[in-house]
Image (cartoon, rainbow, N blue to C red):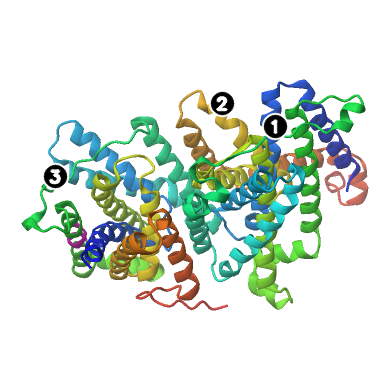
Amino acid sequence: MDALLHQVLAGLATGGIYASMALALVMIYQATHLVNFAQGELAMFSTYIAWSLIEAGMPYWAAFFLTVGFSFVLGVVIERVVIRPVEHAPVLAVVVVFIALLVILNSVTGWIYTFTIKTFPSPFPEQPLFGNKYMSSHEIGAICVTMVVLVLLYAFFRYTPLGLAMRAAAQNPESSRLVGIRVGWMLALGWGLAAAIGSVAGMMVAPIVFLDPNMMGGVLLYAFAAALIGGIDSPGGAVFGGFLVGVLENVLGAFVIGNELKLAVALVLIIGVLTVRPSGFFGKVHVTRV
Amino acid sequence: MKKSALIGYAVLLAIACALPFLVSEYRTFQFTLVLVYSIALLGLNILTGYNGQISLGHGAFYAIGAYVAAILMDKAGFPYWATIPLAGAVCLVAGFLFGLPALRLEGLYLALATFALGVSLPQLLKYHHLEGWTGGVQGIVITKPDAPEFLASLGLTLNQDQWLYFFTLAVTLVMFLLAWNLLRGRIGRAMMAIRDNHVAAEAMGVNNAMVKSLTFGVSAMFTGVAGALGAIAIQFVAPDSFNIFLSLTFLIGMVIGGVASISGALYGALFIQFVPNVADEISKAAPWAIFGLFLLGFTYLMPLGIAGAIRMGLARLTRKAHNSQPVENMIRPHSPKEENP
């Protein structure tokens, strides 16, 4: 029982990280109806930036916020320069561009920082909080950070004019354009936000999986599964999905199928959700007219 | 087929046959891999280019083909040539089965599901309950086949690399002929109709579900045959050589060579085999950066790939040649000369 509780709690901690990655995916999906295959590598690249800043002697939280800002700008620039030309292109062209982004970010990072594994500091204390024996303070901290991001996002979309404009641009671009919303820039903003959220996820996961250019491959897969379970157009659903996938992965990995097949859990979840209930738990069911 | 095209293919085949006698053993091995990749790219192109189903996980079928060949040779003592059709058959079934749930997925979602397949495959291959078959992380080592005896008695001595090259060339020819025959016929047209407008295809009486899952199977079969040949050529299979980047390499080869083009498979294979070699001299990470830049460049500037560019160039050249002939004026009575007195 004790072991199960431990696995569930550890699952919640990694689930928080999957949840933030899933949130980033949902952000881009909401703005552009695209699934960003390069999201993981974008987060990985941001994490390396944070690592350089910390190595250069900057305090952790300063580096943290600077990285988030930098990632936001990077996301906006990528949307403007790389994604915009294929906005109305066929799906294959879009997927190819995402894959190109993925391999470029991966190899450029490897080129600059080499492929050797690095350790990444955690901002939270070494000792477990309140003397509990189940979760390290980094795990608790990661969950809290995810929650803060979620609340901030909710507040942004619910209470600010800019958030309203972004939601409008995603839902009905034509009408939004008529009332004076700059739809193109809203999409770029969506990319920027997604990249910023991704960078938070990257910095939270790096102390656990260590820093290397391929660190986000598995995380991205779990995030896909999380986003799909929650419904790819539902931010709340993505967070729920993230925690669910984290717990499932840990519990199944520990007691049922063994650690070796953890990624297969994600594969089965993705294919299962897509075939049985493509809109997820909280997503809208889409009906297309022939 | 036009006479000029036939002559072109004959010349190409003659060059392909002469190649192993002109270059070093290592280059021969590299050209063998080019042929192997061209079959794999052809398989992916049948699915993605001709049928519009995007796959980012074709490395999985390549791996299955490679493992089937390796296990049959290592554990069951099969001769190398007998493993090729079996690997193809296993992949045909595997592809068909994966194609069934894939029927419900379109575009981006299929890309996502196949991406997941590609990422999780190395873990499945390492699974310790299968270790007795797959050799776990260590993989399986295979011996390279010798040239058959009867060739030597005919006075033709080939070393192992040269023999393997010719064996692969023969298989490649068969596979390309199969693909060409499949794509120009009824089923090929049905595949393209589904890609262009699946509702209209259904209305015309095409059994979408059957054609799509069969296409998945056939595509996987091609890639599986390539995997088996690749395993025999490299003499080694291990889980980590079949990671997601292998699948992405195939996607890159297909896009650069030319989407929905049979000859594009060959250009793409040459690209993914030789460009990394050149780029490796700059940095270990450089090949993928260059792959990525090429991908972006081709998507924006040359969406039909090398094959498309060649086709356009040829069309332009031949049109010019026709224009200079006087026959053209006879076909079009209102030539500009008559209009301007």
Q: Nearer the viewer, mark 2 or mark 1?
A: 1
Q: Which of marks 2 and 1 is nearer the N terminus?
A: 1
Q: Which quadrant of the structure image shows residue B268?
A: top right
**Chain name for mark 3:** A
Residue B243 appearing in the image: yes
Spatial distance from mark 3 to mark 1, Cα to Cα?
53 Å
Q: Nearer the viewer, mark 3 or mark 1?
A: 1
Q: What element carries label 1?
A: helix
Q: What crowding class fits label 3: few (fewer than 14 Cα within 10 Å), some (14-19), or many (20 or more)?
A: few
Q: In this view, does B269 lie above or below A234?
A: above
In the image, taking residue A218 as reference, residue B89 lies left or right, namely right
Spatial distance from mark 2 to mark 3, Cα to Cα?
43 Å
Q: What crowding class fits label 1: few (fewer than 14 Cα within 10 Å), some (14-19), or many (20 or more)?
A: many
Q: Mark 3 points at which residue?
A: A61
Q: Name the residue under label 2.
A: B278
**Chain name for mark 1:** B
